[in-house]
Image: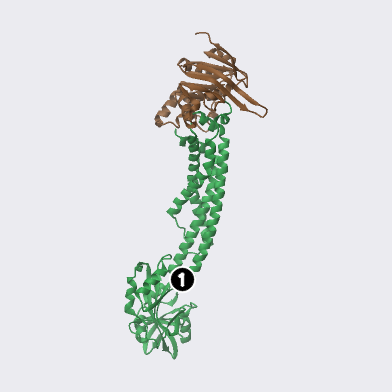
Chain colours: A green, B brown
């Protein structure tokens, strides 16, 4: 028999109060867990989107002459500006300190060519990397593999009357159309996409690339820092980050987090109040019992410890149950708040944190009731004497 | 020196009209092994007297020395230690803790003692056997009769082997036959050398006491000694 035996037995044999105490704290902890894990899942989703978003860094030549653009980024003039990026320089990208965060490097060469009497834009790409990066592209047919194959954007295909399997000549070089890019609504619709080496010859830009798209892998890795590192590695080129979409989404999530935090604080405060009132009621109800303890030789400290042991036990239980209840609620709410990729994140830190929070709130709210109990006068507590 | 020395003990309660003297200048000494009965009408100060010896409240004036210890000079926490080591309380309405079994109730005073759990259990079983309740050890107070609850309360008072037992109307809520058997148990304990101070209304219990103190209006109105055995 120890103090905790008394505490456990009291909890075990007075189930209604235990349930009430538990509920008060549990709801608070579950809310905190729900809010935190929801925002964690949504952040993870954004990171996932960002990874699938494709390139988030663009490397373009430094130039003052602006005559051609792609993807909203203005390129050097096709015919007049000699400044393109030497393909050999791209090896330096792999030397930056954050190279591990680079998911893909997709160089491309761009230029105008004449096909069936029309001027169209030809883009030479490293096919495997390009099609890996542009996951949202869907192709009728298949991506190009060989040097004499090409994929046509939807609007250029319509203009030139191209279908998968067609043959077409560009500057007297015969190509087979392996696929048509479905409409993307972007400038990709106006492109003919061919292998890098072939395009370099056709555009008369041997060993040169017009721009490089770089995909950084992680959502929270320092993109600005990577941009600086890339700029240092390629001093002749201009390096910029594209983050608009992700940033606005992150901003929305940050706002949600602030809201979630506010709600969690309020619910926890209410939980603490419930614990306080219940423990205070419990102490008053047990005045006589506490008098017995004191008469039997329990010190004030023993009585306080007894009450706090009960509070801590209930709190720990509420922490564990609250964590699981919160995760359950997250699992139910997530599909409504986030998109398909959002997944429940089982986080050890969150589990430990919710235990700790429950313990802290439960014992702090019981501190005064425990003190009050320890100060009860044993004679008034007993009355029979 | 006597085991308990009481000098000029007074306890006054302030009330709206005037100060009420629950106890007024009691001097008394009690030797070890004494079975002292404290009798008197309601409001005579019996319970206050017992509370003071038990160190549950402080006097307005006077001292109590138990085994040479001036108990009211002890700091609050040490007074609790004193109660644990020197006293066993038996309350009028048993005052068992409802959510603890008979055995656990008996072990209560040991809960805050540094003693191996096995030893605590062993001692509790021993005293339960002593009061004839071995078979009821696992029962909650609600499942026990009044007499059985009283026995559990006595076992709880004995478990720490205290030099002094303070009992407040231990037979007050029991039928005559049960009351008699409980008094016999106290008498037996006393014959084994246990010092007991018992507050009672019941004149029939008087035959068990070595000394009977009669209180009236907070003063000793009379004292009688039992005829030598």
Q: x, y (%) of residue B27?
A: 54, 18
**Residue A274, picture quadrant:** top right
Q: Residue at image x 55%, y 55%?
A: A263
Q: x, y (%) of residue A287?
A: 56, 34
Q: x, y (%) of residue A302?
A: 48, 35
Query: In the image shown, does B137 or A208 lie closer to the viewer?
Result: A208
Total numbered labels: 1
Q: Residue at image x 39%, y 31%?
A: B116
In the rendered view, tell whether residue A383 sits above or below residue A361. above
Q: x, y (%) of residue B54?
A: 52, 25
Q: Is residue A55 visible in this depiction of the protein?
A: no
Subunit bearing disc 1: A
Q: Is residue A74 left or right of residue B224?
A: left
Q: Is residue A88 visible in this depiction of the protein?
A: yes
Q: Residue at image x 50%, y 19%?
A: B5
Q: Residue at image x 54%, y 11%?
A: B225
Query: In the image shown, does A306 or B164 lie closer to the viewer?
Result: B164
As drawn, the residue found furthest toward the top would be B228
**Which residue position is annotated with label 1?**
A243
**Residue A277, picture quadrant:** top right
């Amino acid at each position: 028999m120890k103090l905790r035996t008394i505490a456990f037995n009291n909890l075990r044999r007075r189930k209604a109060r235990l349930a009430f105490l538990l509920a008060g704290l549990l709801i608070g902890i579950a809310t905190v867990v729900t809010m935190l894990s929801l925002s964690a899942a949504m952040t993870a989703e954004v990171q996932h989107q960002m990874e699938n978003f494709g390139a988030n860094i663009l490397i373009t030549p430094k130039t003052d002459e602006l005559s051609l653009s792609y993807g909203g980024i203005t390129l050097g003039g096709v015919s007049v500006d000699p400044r393109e990026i030497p393909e050999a320089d791209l090896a330096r990208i792999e030397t930056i300190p954050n190279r591990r965060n680079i998911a893909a490097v997709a160089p491309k060469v761009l230029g105008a060519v004449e096909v069936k009497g029309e001027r169209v834009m030809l883009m030479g790409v490293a096919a495997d990397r390009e099609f890996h990066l542009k996951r949202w592209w869907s192709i009728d047919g298949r991506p190009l593999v060989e040097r004499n194959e090409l994929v046509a954007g939807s609007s250029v295909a319509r203009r030139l009357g191209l279908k998968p399997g067609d043959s077409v000549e560009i500057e007297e070089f015969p190509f087979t159309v392996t696929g048509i890019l479905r409409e993307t609504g972007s400038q990709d619709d106006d492109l003919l996409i061919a292998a890098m080496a072939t395009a370099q010859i056709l555009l008369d830009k041997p060993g040169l690339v017009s721009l490089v798209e770089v995909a950084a892998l992680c959502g929270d890795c320092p993109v600005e820092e990577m941009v600086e590192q890339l700029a240092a590695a390629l001093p002749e080129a201009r390096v910029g980050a594209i983050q608009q979409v992700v940033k606005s989404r992150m901003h929305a999530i940050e706002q949600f987090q602030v809201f979630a935090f506010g709600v969690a604080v309020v619910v926890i405060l209410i939980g603490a109040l419930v614990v306080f009132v219940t423990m205070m009621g419990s102490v008053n109800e047990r005045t006589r019992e506490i008098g017995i303890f004191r008469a039997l030789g329990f010190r004030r400290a023993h009585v306080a410890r007894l009450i706090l042991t009960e509070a801590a036990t209930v709190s720990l239980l509420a922490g564990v149950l609250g964590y699981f209840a919160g995760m359950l609620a997250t699992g139910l709410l997530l599909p409504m708040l986030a998109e398909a990729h959002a997944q429940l994140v089982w986080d050890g830190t969150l589990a430990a944190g919710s235990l700790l929070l429950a313990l802290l709130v439960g014992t702090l709210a019981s501190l005064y009731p425990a003190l009050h109990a320890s100060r009860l006068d044993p004679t008034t507590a007993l009355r029979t004497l | 020196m006597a085991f308990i020395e009481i000098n000029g003990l007074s306890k006054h309660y302030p009330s709206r009209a005037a100060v009420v003297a629950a106890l007024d200048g009691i001097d008394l000494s009690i030797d070890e092994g004494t079975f002292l009965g404290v009798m008197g009408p309601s409001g005579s100060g019996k319970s206050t007297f017992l509370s003071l010896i038990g160190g549950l409240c402080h006097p307005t004036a006077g001292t109590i020395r138990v085994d040479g210890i001036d108990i009211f000079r002890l700091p609050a926490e040490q007074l609790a230690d004193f109660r644990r080591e020197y006293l066993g309380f038996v309350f009028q309405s048993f005052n068992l803790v409802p959510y603890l079994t008979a055995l656990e109730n008996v072990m209560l005073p040991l809960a805050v003692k540094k003693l191996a759990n096995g030893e605590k259990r062993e001692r509790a079983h021993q005293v339960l056997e002593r009061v004839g309740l071995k078979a009821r050890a696992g029962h909650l107070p609600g499942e026990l009769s009044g007499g059985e609850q009283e026995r559990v309360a006595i076992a709880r008072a004995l478990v720490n082997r205290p030099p002094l037992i303070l009992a407040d109307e231990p037979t007050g809520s029991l039928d005559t036959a049960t009351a008699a058997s409980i008094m016999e148990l106290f008498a037996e304990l006393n014959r084994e050398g246990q010092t007991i101070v018992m507050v009672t209304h019941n004149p029939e219990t008087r035959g068990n006491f070595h000394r009977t103190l009669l209180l009236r209006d907070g003063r000793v109105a009379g004292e009688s000694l039992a005829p030598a055995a």
